[in-house]
Every structure is written in structure tokens, then in C-alpha cells.
Image (tube, coloured by chain):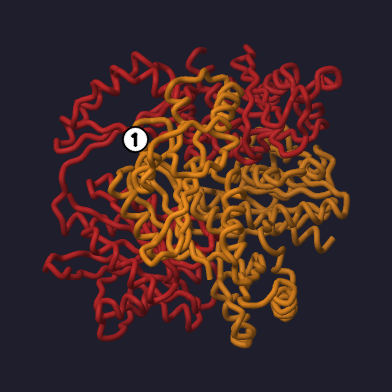
Chain colours: A red, B orange
Amino acid sequence: MVTASICTIGDEILIGQIVDTNSSMIAKALNAIGVKVVRMISGADSEEDIFATVEHCARLSDIVIITGGLGPTKDDITKTALAKFTNAGGFIQSKEQYEIIEKVLTARGIELSDINRAQAMVPDSCKVILNECGTAPCMEFVMQKENGNQYLIFSMPGVPFETENALPKVIEEIISHFKMENIFHKTVCTFGIPESTLSKMIEKWEENLPENIHLAYLPNTILGVRLRLSIYGIDKENGEKEIDSEIAKLKTIIGDAIYGYGESSLQQAIGRLLKEMKMSVCTAESCTGGKIASLITSVPGSSEYFKGSVVAYDNSIKINVLKVREETIAKYGAVSRECVEEMAEGVRKVMDCDFAVATSGVAGPGGGTDINPVGTVWIAVSAKGEVSSKKLRFNAPRAINVERFSSNALNMLREAIINL
Amino acid sequence: MVTASICTIGDEILIGQIVDTNSSMIAKALNAIGVKVVRMISGADSEEDIFATVEHCARLSDIVIITGGLGPTKDDITKTALAKFTNAGGFIQSKEQYEIIEKVLTARGIELSDINRAQAMVPDSCKVILNECGTAPCMEFVMQKENGNQYLIFSMPGVPFETENALPKVIEEIISHFKMENIFHKTVCTFGIPESTLSKMIEKWEENLPENIHLAYLPNTILGVRLRLSIYGIDKENGEKEIDSEIAKLKTIIGDAIYGYGESSLQQAIGRLLKEMKMSVCTAESCTGGKIASLITSVPGSSEYFKGSVVAYDNSIKINVLKVREETIAKYGAVSRECVEEMAEGVRKVMDCDFAVATSGVAGPGGGTDINPVGTVWIAVSAKGEVSSKKLRFNAPRAINVERFSSNALNMLREAIINL
């Protein structure tokens, strides 16, 4: 099996100022073509660390992918370190990357400086892989291990969307160098059953899985618990068949808790359902502050079924825009079944939609009461005027509470759409 | 200088299904007490990888912090691997953690199962650090290197908010074990000047920095370019003085581009300004889909100055709720100066606020035109009825475009508040 390691270079990662999202993005892409990632490692913007991490990774794997340290500023030294590591004779200009640098900076309204120009210079030991949406080119080095085996080093920019853009070209290079063992994955996305409960519910099913199928639990506040099935040493078609037959058995156990497969999300599942039914949705959000709308609109094409949202943080907005009755808030409070139900039905009418979902709760850290402690949320869904609601409680910091409120609201909406 | 390494254990990280946010959170906390993080490394849920990564880290550093692999399911084996690694005699129950498990699961409405109960069992070689908001306890092991020096291993849960909650206790343990070299950091948060332009503007200032002050650039789509100044080997008071005098010089060069210091964000800066002035804000969002409201409300206490938002994805919402004139949209289109200015002033009136910010643009991947290609956004701010607007263009995927639209809208709002 072809193996890879991923190195991220940057003081800003070691001091914790930057969360490394590149490694997971790269790992996902490698995984999909059957390359096994055996290590991820982060080191400093120093020649010593770059050498040490690349050497460590080269010992463990056939491919070393490095991201970061290619910026225009003085603390970025990956390129010069790699030139030394690969015994480059000198630097040469990549004309094509130079043209991209001009184009990218002009589009951003930035005048080309000497440090921008220098980014088109690359070690003569590398093959350039163009970075179409940034200034630092990717580089590929074909190297030799002590035992004579070849290994590849790739250097990619640290800016995540530039990495993402250049990644398919790196993957192509890898495919053209190695022969991959067959592998096939399918991820089952579930929501609403906690991991430990789920694990108990599907214990027997798990025990009876064929030996060549491997199961991994991927719990996530926004996405729920995803179950990833991997099958090795079999072609795609038969692999998919085998996995699908196991998933069919799983469905009889957990049914509608499954909302999708692969890189799915609750908002995508909702989008698929609403498009199919040619129906529309809107949201009224208090404690979630626009998060649910933001998640729904993260799906390209969501304008087909999402009309809008009223973030009613202040009670005056609940009353004036959403038409919640003043008496309701006076009598029951804003965090109540009565208020959230009026919010849902109110926004549905204002926006003239088939469905609406509303939230009102206490995200924290302040604002908790005896009846509604921090982490409490009321969620209501109106399905063509049929309103249902529930109260949930979580025990997390503000940001996570908002995520949980939002994902549970989306799931409640999804269930209401299914059950219409 | 006391050094640390951070290991994350989990197949789900190596296959790229989970982005590791724990390492940066832990690194930030270590950094703040003067512990230098020298390596971050991720390995699989296998005994072999756990041993290899812990050994690798123990060679490099005085502290090894491990997160992950403590879940209730079969693929989580960190605890048993560490028991073996530390030559534990057996497992014993942590009564206090058991009580927490009962409390946490009851609050979530989950019935205690045997696998939940097993989470309270720990190797007898460890000191338990309670996990107050989850089921898996943290563990501390005092170990000895071959040279006789002590080193510490900490095992923490993989769920980020559980790690966050337990982290202060781990930090306390570290402080009680080591004497730290003095270090002082200050981060200057800037927005609106691209990294390469900024680097050129402050080149002379950077060259004249005293030798014991180190500068790092931390560019970020949401936060702008942050400049982190670190000073070593000096007490906090004098360190702060020295750094502040350098920052004073920096201010004369880049002025209002500085929006804050340390862990600041544009939405926090806006919150500080509005609280001081006792003024309020609301948003009207088309292409940003609630993201701006979501960012503003991510700040605890934002209900003091944020009244709400209308996400007007569909033109009918722009017309009916925000009172944009039908003729405006018919004549100029929704992505236009005219429309976005009416949106800003419209929402400000509907929500009765001092300030309003509005966006209308094309996030992509579809919907682009010759006049308004994907990545185009119109942003308008109304400051007590004084409306200004500007058009920007970016060249990124949907999610990043939305982030850039939102952060630029927030910065335009901030500038309007400053200049009122």
C-alpha cells in the first residue's frame, strides 16, 4: 500500500494561532485514491525542523506532502530549505507562475512588488505545479531513499483554498507514479442518536461485518455520528455492492436517523428533499443568531428553496417583524414553547414559505435562569402551519451550544419534511 | 526553556474526517505560560503508533500531551496503550469521574451502559484529572527519560470542548512541575491591508526592532493580518513596556487598520465601540446568508447592541421586509449599489438601530454575470441614515467568498462607527 505523510510548516501553527485544516483536506484526497496517511507532523519555520520533519516522514512513507512556509515574508523559508535538502543547483523563474502572480494581484488591486516577483523563483531540482489562485507555486521533487527506492516530496502553499485548488494536480502526479491497492469507502451519516447508544444498538451488526470491512465512528457536533465503512483489496463495483448490502441491514436498525451518505450534511439533505418537493423554507433565529441560515446557505443553489431568515435577537424584532404577541413574551418569556412556536409560524407567514424553523434559548455564558439554564433551547418547526416544538439542553461553551442548537434544529426540520 | 509536544491519536484524523483543533488550542495555552511547542504529530488508533509518537515526542520535549482515542467505542485504545507504556499494574475506578459520567449522561437523557461505566476505569500508574463535561477522564503520568530526567505525559479527551474545559487543570499541573523562562507576547490585529503591502509598509519598522523581539505574520481571511510580537528573557512588565513602545511606532504607520490586540476579532472591536457609545446595529444579508449576524452574535453579551438581522435571500424578502423598491431591483439588479444601500437603510429603519450593514453579491459557484462575476459583493453601511457603499471582488470558493464578504462588511461597519 502506498503511504504518505503530511508536514505542516509554520511557527503560527506551533504557537496555536492557526488551526491546520490543510492536513485533513489532503488526507481525505489521498485516502480516496487508496493512499494511506501514516503520519501528520508540524514543525517550525526553521531549516532544522523542516529537515527533521521531512526526514522523519520520508522514513515512514512513499510520499511527503509539505504545506506552508511559502509566503512572501521573511519568516517563510520552506522553499530555500527544500532547495538545500534536494541539492538544487540554483533558482530559476517559473514564467507561468509569474504570469499568474501578475493576474492574481491585479485582480486584488495590489501592485506587484519585488517580494511578489521573487515568489515565481523555484529551485531547479523541482517540477513546478502551478498555483492558479495564489502567488506561491507548488513544487514536486523526486527523491531517492537510502535503500534506492524513490519517494516524492510535494511542497504546497499554506493558504487553505490555494492548497485545495492545487490538490487535484498533486493527486494526479501521485497516481501517475504509483500503482494503488483497491480501496472503497462509504460513510453513513446519522443524526439524533448519541455515539454510545448507537454503538450499543448496532453492536450485533458490527460484530457480523465481514472481515475485510472496517468500521470507524466519526462523531461531530454539526454532522452527528457518521459511520465510515472501508473495504480493502476488492474492485470498486464489488466493494460498493458488499458495503451496500451491509448498509441495507443497518437501515433496518436505525432507519430515518440516516440522513445521507459520504460528504453529506443535514443542510444538504434538507436541500435535496425541498428541491424534490419544490418547497421552500425560512428561519427565525434568536439564540442561534443566524447560524442556521448560514448553514442552509452554505449549500450552493440553496436560493432555490431558502427564502430568508429573521434573526430576532431583540424581543422588539420578535414582536414587530415576526408578529409574536407581546402578551406571549410577557407571560411565558422569550425562551418558551409559546414564543418559539409563534416565531416559527410568524416567519413562515412573513416569508410565505412551506416550512419554517425557529429557535429561542440561552447560549451562554450569561442569561441563564432556574427554568432555562445556559444550554437550554426551544426549537419549533412549522410545516405548512402544523407547528411542533421541543426543548433540549446542552452543557457546552457558547459556540458549541449554538452549533448543537442549530444542528438539532436542522434535524427537526428534516424530520418534519420527511413526515409531511 | 520547557518544551512540549502534542500528539493527536485517531484514525479519523489520518483519514481526514476530523480537523484537529485541539492541538492549536493546547499550543496557545502552553505558549502563554512560556512552554515552547516543538512538535505536533498525529498517529493512528494503534498501539504501535501510540508508542511511536509518544516516544518520538518524549525525545524532543519535557511534556507530551496526547488527545483522542478515549471514546467508548472499540477503536479507542489510547488508555490501554498508555497503561502498557507506563507499566501500569492494573485498572482502578475513579469514583469522582464515575459520578460525573452519571451526571453528564443523565443531563443528556442517556441511560448509563457498561461501556459508559468502563470509562471511569484508569491505569493505576496515573493521576486522574477530572473531565467535568464528558465521560473520559484526563490522565497524568510522571515518567523518566533514559538520562534520568522526568517528563510528563498527559492524556486528554479528543472532543474539543472537553479538552478546552480540562486544559486549565493540565496547565496548572505543568506550572507546578517546571520553572518557566519569561516570555511575553502581544498580537496586533489589523484589517484592510494585504500581507505583502503591509510587509512593505512596515519594512523599516521591522528592521529596527530590537533583537530580543521576534515578529510573526498571522494572515487570516476572517481576522485580517495579525502581527505577533514576542519578547524573550525579560519580565512581563518590562516586556510589555518594550513591546508597547514598538507598537506606538507601528501605529503611526498603519493607524486605524489596527482594530485590536491579542485574541480580538472585528466583531469584538465593533462590540466594544457600540457598548461605549450605547448604540445599536443590525444587518441585512443576501449573499452572506446570516454569516455576519452569526459572527456578531458569537460575542457573549452582543444582545446589548445587536438587535437582529434580515437574511433576504429571495428578492421578495428584500422588497416586503426590507422595503427595497421593486423598481430598484428591476432597474439595477439585486447586486447593485442602489439595492444594497436601500437594504442597509431599510433594515436600520425596520429594526430602529443606529447602524446597519448590508450585503448583496455572488458567492458562487453559480450565479455570476459579466457585470457581477462570482466573488463580487456590494457592501453598504448606514450610520444614522448616512449611507456609504463599496464594491469588492474576490476569487475564492463559495465558503471563503462568504467569509471575505463578511469580514470586509464588518470592517466597513467598524470604520463607519469610528468615523461617525
Q: Left or right of A196: which side holds B214?
A: right
Q: Residue at x 64, y 29 (%)?
A: A283
Q: Residue at x 64, y 14 (%)?
A: A387
Q: Secondary structure at mark 1?
A: loop
Number of numbered discs: 1
Front residue of this view, candidates B361 and A391: A391
Image coords of residue A19 (percent x, y): 50, 55
**Residue type at numbered disc 1:** Asp
Q: Residue at x 47, y 26 (%)?
A: B116
Residue B245, picture quadrant: bottom right
Quick check: can you spot residue A157? Answer: no
Quick check: can you spot residue A339? Answer: yes
Front residue of this view, candidates A146 and B292: A146
Q: Left or right of B105: which side holds A162?
A: left
Q: Chain of mark 1?
A: B
Image coords of residue B5 (percent x, y): 45, 59
Measured along the vertical axis of the image, is residue B305 above or below residue A415? below
Q: Residue at x 55, y 30 (%)?
A: B95
> Looking at the rendering, in which quadrant would you find the C terminus of chain B?
bottom right
Mark 1 Cα-neighbour bin, 10 Å: few <14, some 14–19, many ≥20: some
Image coords of residue A313 (percent x, y): 75, 35
Measured along the vertical axis of the image, is residue A63 above or below residue A115? above
Q: Left or right of A349: which side holds A83?
A: left
Image coords of residue A26 (percent x, y): 35, 53
Front residue of this view, candidates A381 and A348: A381
- Residue at label 1? B75
